[in-house]
């Protein structure tokens, strides 16, 4: 899989001094450090989990299994937040580190990179590999993580905040080689070999509906670095391209209405509300302190408060319970014509990130290969 | 079921096939009889469809402007979420269990007595 890879970074004078110097102090034998990066995004298992959650929603509410399953998130980490793709924000951070390209792969969010693949990276001569599981948004200085990793001299450094792991870890060549000798999925080192990197900056777990909503609120009020993707028509009110709002619509800031979303007469959006792209909010419906995920239709007269709506499902942010809006016609997924048969396919998942910059394979190639375990796609940054 | 503070009836949701018509009839009849609070229990409803929401609104309309008090028991948190989303919970008080509904201070003759005493300027 990695025979033709060009994934490497060679530090040059003035180009990436931090990594180069850190490597020097760590080991005098090297002038340059080859640093690679991998982003692990949700795979089919997660989409299958979404379907399972949907099935369980329709079970009798008294069933304990249903109560457990109903609390599961049913959206992916690639669903935009105020129009922003979290993958792209991580790619920006990796680019700032001076890495020219990264590998995208799909895997269950609880799993990492297969050890055999880690060994593959090691064989290419990589000294360090940054692995980012796409489950959090963090305003992390990756250069500081690299510096810490080099100073601590542990095979694996894992970023975490007060609430636990953030899904970001840095492996050195020892961990990469060790990975090749193991057969299970892991980061290539035992728990004892992992050095925690305490991150004290801004971070939110995007697979948690509650933290996702907190991130929306923070981004709308400039409490974090993320900004809504649209035009700020007045203070703390952003509207995306092609959005249509009836004259009687009330938008109470902070609020965001995504691209091509239609908000009909008498509806209210805000405060602290986000309606993502291609949604329809029908007459008189109120969306307050909530998020409506892309391509969602909301029927007239509803009250969406402290909730996350994704197509025909609503998740209450206070209790985590998911309810099905579809039997009553209260909400549904708006299918795009060209993707009616393949909503949520990996081809769509990766299309935006790789549209102009895939080096080794196209997004469609990726989609085909994704039926096998652990597909890979190299993306130029 | 006749409770001390009102009548408890199961909600004849559309997903229930057996005896739904009879339950619906009984519910609407109970709502027409003034004076006695009616507690409608959604515990047996897995999900709600548009017919159920129509019937809920019909129930609320039935008691509007009358002495009959209507209370809903959601039975599950998912149903509670749907009652909130449809704003039904702003029209009719919603409780998590029948016990809670029966303990509702405004339920039944007790509240009528309190209102009467208050109007007479006496301590309840």
Image (cartoon, rainbow, N blue to C red):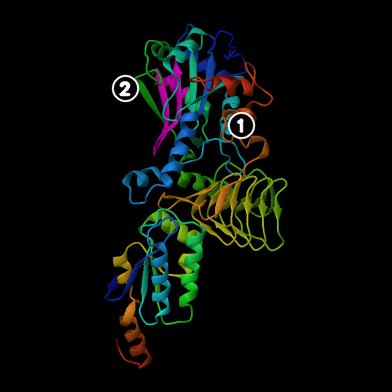
Q: Which residue is mark 1?
A: A348
* A370 over A137 or under it: above or below: above
Q: Quadrant of the N terminus of chain B?
A: bottom left
Is residue A200 among the parts visible in the rendering?
no
Please report the bounds of the magenta region as a residue range.
A147-172
Q: Quadrant of the C terminus of chain B?
A: bottom left
Question: How far from the left and from the top, in percent, is residue A274?
Answer: 58, 50
Residue sitting farthest toward the bottom: B120
Q: Secondary structure at mark 1?
A: helix
Determine the chain carrying the residue at label 2: A
Question: How far from the left and from the top, in percent, is residue A178?
Answer: 38, 12
Q: How many C-alpha atoms fall within 10 Å of the one at disc 1: few (<14), some, or many (≥20)?
A: some
Residue A154 colored in magenta in the image: yes
- Do tags 1 and 2 sit on the same chain? yes
Mark number displayed over residue A192: 2
Question: How far from the left and from the top, in percent, is residue A40?
Answer: 50, 26
Residue B17 colored in magenta in the image: no
Question: How far from the left and from the top, in percent, is residue A355?
Answer: 67, 26
């Amino acid at each position: 899989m990695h025979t033709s890879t060009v994934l490497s970074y060679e530090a040059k004078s003035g180009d990436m001094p931090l990594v180069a110097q850190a490597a020097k102090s760590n080991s005098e034998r090297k002038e340059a450090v080859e640093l690679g990066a991998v982003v692990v995004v949700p795979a089919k298992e997660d989409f299958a989990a979404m379907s399972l959650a949907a099935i369980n929603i329709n079970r009798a509410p008294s069933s304990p299994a249903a109560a457990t399953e109903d609390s599961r998130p049913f959206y992916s980490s690639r669903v935009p937040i105020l129009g922003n793709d979290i993958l792209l924000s991580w790619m920006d951070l990796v680019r700032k580190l001076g890495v020219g390209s990264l590998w995208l792969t799909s895997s269950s969010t609880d799993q990492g990179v297969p050890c055999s693949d880690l060994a593959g990276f090691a064989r290419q001569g990589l000294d360090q590999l940054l692995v980012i599981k796409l489950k959090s948004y963090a305003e992390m200085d990756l250069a500081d993580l690299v510096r810490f990793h080099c100073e601590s001299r542990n095979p694996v450094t894992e970023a975490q905040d007060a609430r636990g792991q953030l899904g970001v870890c840095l492996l050195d060549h020892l961990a990469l080689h060790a990975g090749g000798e193991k057969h299970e999925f892991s980061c290539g080192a035992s728990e004892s070999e992992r050095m925690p990197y305490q991150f004290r900056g801004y971070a939110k777990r995007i697979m948690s509906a509650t933290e996702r909503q907190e991130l929306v609120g923070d981004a709308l009020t400039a409490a974090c670095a993320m900004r809504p993707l649209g035009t700020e028509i007045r203070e703390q009110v952003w509207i995306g391209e092609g959005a249509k709002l009836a004259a009687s619509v009330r938008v109470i800031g902070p609020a965001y209405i995504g691209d091509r979303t239609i908000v009909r007469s008498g509806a209210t959006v805000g405060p602290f509300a986000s309606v993502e792209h291609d949604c329809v909010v029908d007459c008189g419906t109120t969306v307050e302190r909530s998020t409506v995920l892309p391509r969602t239709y909301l029927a007239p007269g509803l009250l969406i408060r402290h909730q996350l709506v994704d197509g025909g499902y609503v998740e209450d942010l206070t209790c985590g319970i998911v309810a099905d809006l579809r039997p009553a016609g209260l909400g549904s997924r708006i299918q795009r014509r060209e993707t009616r048969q393949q909503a949520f396919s990996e081809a769509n998942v990766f299309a935006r990130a790789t549209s102009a910059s895939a080096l080794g394979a196209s997004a469609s190639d990726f989609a085909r290969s994704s039926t096998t375990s652990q597909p890979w796609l190299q993306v130029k940054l | 079921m006749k409770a001390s503070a009102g009548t408890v009836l199961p909600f004849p949701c559309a997903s229930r096939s057996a005896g739904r018509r009879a339950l619906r009839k009984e519910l609407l009849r109970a709502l027409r009889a003034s004076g006695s609070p009616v507690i409608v229990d959604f515990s047996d409803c897995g999900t709600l469809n548009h017919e159920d929401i129509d019937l809920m609104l019909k129930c609320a309309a039935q008691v509007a402007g009358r002495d009959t008090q209507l209370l809903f028991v959601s039975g599950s948190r998912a149903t509670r979420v749907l009652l909130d989303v449809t704003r039904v919970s702003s029209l009719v008080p919603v409780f998590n269990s029948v016990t809670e509904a029966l303990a509702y201070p405004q339920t039944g003759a007790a509240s009528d007595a309190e209102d009467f005493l208050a109007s007479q300027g006496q301590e309840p």
